[in-house]
Structures are given as structure tokens and as C-alpha cells.
Image: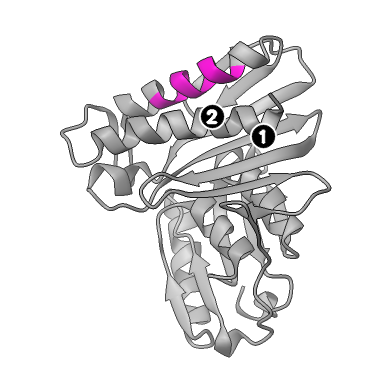
Amino acid sequence: MTPIQVAEKAARASGELLRENFGCANVVDEALHHDLKLALDKESQDLIFGIIAESFPDHALYGEEGIAGNQESEYQWIVDPIDGTVNFFYGIPHFCISIALRLKEEIIVGLIYDPMINDLWTVVKGEKPYLNGKEISCSPRTKLEESILYIGPGKTEGSLQKGLERFGKASLRARKMRMMGSAALGMAYIATGRLDAYVESRISLWDIAAGKLLVEAAGGKTTLTPHPTKPDVWGIVSTNGKIPIEEVL
């Protein structure tokens, strides 16, 4: 099986697990002011990693819930087993599984799967991006006044403040604003033309690795600004590549 086929197999298995547990009482491992960690996050990641390791036992595995595999490998799978955990916990059916494969510093495979509506986005470096097997592209919109923007609020005090400031400023220009709770789905929506931009001042690699490749393959643009002290944490501006997003940042 190819890497994208293995990623799909793992995502669909994890998606079945999440559907079975959606709307049930889920064990909370950690409750923070603006976030949750569920036992199911770890269970989902272990399931994904197990399937990947069957085909690629020498690859490194790096996820929100920890690492596994051969950490000396040039190939690294980057996984968010539930992107949108708070949505999932509260019974909001807007969350996904994000899987990417990185060769050295370059993402070469990306997959985002929404198990609740069975939407599967896939992309391989240098090839066209797809949603459920059909080629996709970013929207042709060029004006902020015609656009829908997703501004992520962040979780720390500083990123929350920045997000709210951006939301207020952008809301005066955009057709509609959204805060959706899943960075990966936000980027998948940009690649499909459902949204026109996603902006957040602090986000982790596993949230955006697959989405970055997907958006760029669909004709969009993603700019990452590294956090000054935390590795694999970034500020992100991802757009259809056409709207003047800098006017509201």
C-alpha cells in the first residue's frame, strides 16, 4: 500500500471509533480553561499509529498525544487524532482526523477526514488535491467583502486577545466571520472553496501539517511564523491566495 492508502485506512478506522463514541460519556484525562484532553484522543492515536506501523515500521510517529516508532527516521508521520476535541466532547459534530507524512522538513502526504459526514480530503506532494476522489481548488474570490474568514481565538491569554482583535477588525470587512474549533477542517474548507482564509496566532504542527499541503496544492497560500520559544508552534495565515488578508491582520 502507498502512504496515502495507509493514511486513509488509518483515518477510516479511527473515524469509526470516534463515531461509535460520539454523544457518549467520554473520560476526560485533562481539563484546562480553554481545552480538554480525552482518553479517546490517546486511543484514536494509538489505533492510527498501529495501522501505520504495520506498513512502515521504520518510520517515526509524532502526534498530539506523544511519539512512537523510529525517531531517527527521515520519514515522520504527524497526527492529530481528534482535531476539535472540545466540539466532540460537547456533541458538536465538527471535528476531524489529520494525518500528514513529512520527509525531512517537507510534507509529502496529507489527509483530513471528517467522520461525521464522511468527507475525506487527500493530497500527495506534486499532485492534485481531492475531496472524496474529486479534484478541488480554492475559491476565486478576490474581495474581502465577498469572503468568509475563520479567525482562530487561540488558547493563551495573549493569543486570545490577538484573535479577538483580529476578529473584530475583519468582521467590518468580510461577508461573514467564523470561529469553528478545528484548524484542520478550516484549512480543508479553504482548499474546497468553502472558506477563504484561516488566521490564528498560535497553533501546533499536528493541527496544520496536512492542511498546509492541501491548501497550497489547491492554489492557496499558507504563511507560518514560528513561535520564538516553542518548537512546532506557529502563527498561521492561510488563504485562497487571492484576497487581501493583510488588510485586516
Whether residue 112 appears in this view of the structure is: yes
Magenta stretch bounds: 44-52
Left or right placement of residue 133 versus residue 169 in this view: right
Up/down of 77 relative to 246, above or below: above
Task: Confirm whether the magenta stretch covers residue 35.
Answer: no
**Residue drawn at point x = 75 percent, y = 38 percent:** 107
- Give residue 129's position: percent from left, percent from top: 70, 54
- Quick one: quadrant of the C terminus? bottom right
Up/down of 186 relative to 142, above or below: above
**Residue drawn at point x = 80 percent, y = 49 percent:** 127
* Residue located beneath label 1 in the image: 4
**Kind of residue sitting beneath label 1:** Ile
Predominant SS along the magenta part: helix
Q: CA distance from mark 1 to mark 2?
A: 9 Å
Whether residue 33 appears in this view of the structure is: no
Front-most of residues 145 and 167: 145
- Quick one: quadrant of the N terminus? top right
Front-most of residues 118 and 188: 118
SS of the residue at dot 1? helix
**Residue drawn at point x = 30 percent, y = 38 percent:** 19
Up/down of 217 relative to 66, above or below: below
